[in-house]
Image (cartoon, helix red, strand yellow):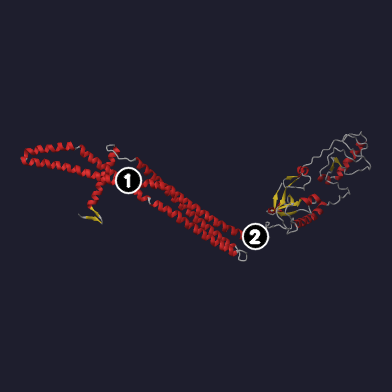
Amino acid sequence: MAEMGKGVTAGKIASNMQKKLTRAQEKVLQKLGKADETKDEQFEQCVQNFNKQLTEGTKLQKDLRTYLASVKAMHEASKKLTECLQEVYEPEWPGRDDTNKIAENNDLLWVDFHQKLVDQALLTMDTYLGQFPDIKSRIAKRGRKLVDYDSARHHFESLQTAKKKDETKIAKPVSLLEKAAPQWCQGKLQAHLVAQTNLLRNQAEEELVKAQKVFEEMNLDLQEELPSLWNSRVGFYVNTFQSIAGLEENFHKEMSKLNQNLNDVLTSLDKQYSSNAFPIKAQPRKKTKLFSRLKKKMSSDSAPAKANKSPSPPPDGTPITSPEIKTVNHELEPSSLETPGAGIPKSPSQPAETAPASAEPAGTEAPPASAEASGTEAAAGAEAPKTETDSGSAPTSLPAVVVETFPATVNGTEEGSAASERADMPPGFLFKVQAMHDYAATDSDELPLKAGDVVLVIPFDNPDEQDEGWLMGVKEADWLQHKELDQSRGVFPENFTERVQ
């Protein structure tokens, strides 16, 4: 027989193809219900348990590999962190050799922990799962042998039931042969047909016995192994997780010792350098010497202002009247008194006893400053006749004078309401802050601070003079004691304080 390949012949290929066709035909007949199927419920339950156990083991193996990858990543991160500590730890600092030794032991501890996890957990897991592929292939083979057994059984049963039919089919040719063949040949022909039928039945029986034997052997082995494998999962899970827990416990114990040693080294370093605390710095100022510049500006602005505000006397010598109206307790103050000793009514309801010759009625509104400055003579001439006529008339009551005052605003803050509510606060008070750190003034316009000082924040006279991160204020103690703002106020860094109100 010609060879088709190494170890493979044409007869073997034909035999395998015949088996596959027979199995496919048997499965089709079983699905169609034309052939019964041998079932073993106990074995099927074992197969379900096997598949479940394989799924759980595969997931556990995957998660364990992820855990080991995380341990490796944590090792790398810890190694980089210790290397960073070694870089920033200066050589003259005490305990540098100890930190280097701790870093080395830390690295060795991570390596040992990872290797033990691989040896005691991952390799054991691989060995445990290594037995599943063989058993899985045997289960599949057992399924194929079961189909062969059912096919052989059905074939033998069909030969048994068709025995009479075959004898009838054989008898018809014999009767025909009897007519054509001599007498002495008829017996041999009948014997040959009977022998051929018996041969087919014997071959089917042998195939059935052989298939049944192979199937039962594999079925018996699997029925013994599958329950044992299913029960072994408990001990395997216990050993695996106990190993992981024990390794983690020892690792963290050793790591805690190293961390304690490192903490001791850093504590001793902190004690030695505790006085050199990290200073808090204020933001740099761009506009320094604020008060000196303001004084220079005010002095430079006041000189031309005074020269412009002093008017020249009028040519006729008439005195210049003030354009402002002074109100005290809602009473008008007369600009001039021609008749000395003239009385001023204390109340609008009381008539004046003696009206001055040159005085105006109290209800007369004062002329504007510009009109009064330019037309003093005209007002004086018109006022004289009126005074003479009024002096002889009966005394009349003066109307009440109501002067409205509007609150002044500084930087958008109304001082009228704030003055009544915060009478003990400096003008323009905004809020309170408390110093959290000491601050030494570096300029004449800065306010020195001590931790715990309470500062009353006020607005800048010129908002453009305010630097970012700086505030203007006066210490509460200085304000309550002196009530002096110009000598006590100053600028200070905002990040040295905390707002309390």
- Residue ID for mark 1: 220
Can you see residue 461? Answer: no
**Residue 390, how many percent across, how many down?**
91, 36
Q: Secondary structure at mark 1?
A: helix
Quadrant (top left, top right, bottom left, bottom right) of the N terminus: bottom left
Quarter of the view holding residue 3: bottom left
Q: How many marks?
A: 2
Distance Cα–Cα, label 1 vs label 2: 75 Å
In the image shown, does 352 or 80 lie closer to the viewer?
Answer: 80
Residue 239 makes an appearance in the image: yes
Residue drawn 9% across the image and 37% down it: 176
Q: Residue at x 47, y 57 (%)?
A: 116
Mark 2 residue crowding within 10 angstroms, few (<14) / some (14–19) / many (20+): few
User: Which of the pair 349/360 is nearer the observer?
Assistant: 349
Taking 323 as reference, is 177 left or right? left
Outermost residue toward the bottom?
92
Nearest to viewer (mark 1 / mark 2): 1
In this view, 252 is above or below 424: below
Q: Position of residue 24 (x, y in %)?
A: 28, 43
Q: Secondary structure at mark 2?
A: helix
Please name the residue shown 25% across and 48% down the image.
Answer: 17
Q: Which residue is mark 2?
A: 270
Expressed as whole percent of the image width and height from the top left, the position of residue 120 reads 45, 55
Amino acid carrying label 1: it is: Leu
The tag on residue 338 is: none
CB of mark 1 within 8 Å of CB of mark 2? Answer: no
**Amino acid type, mark 2:** Asp
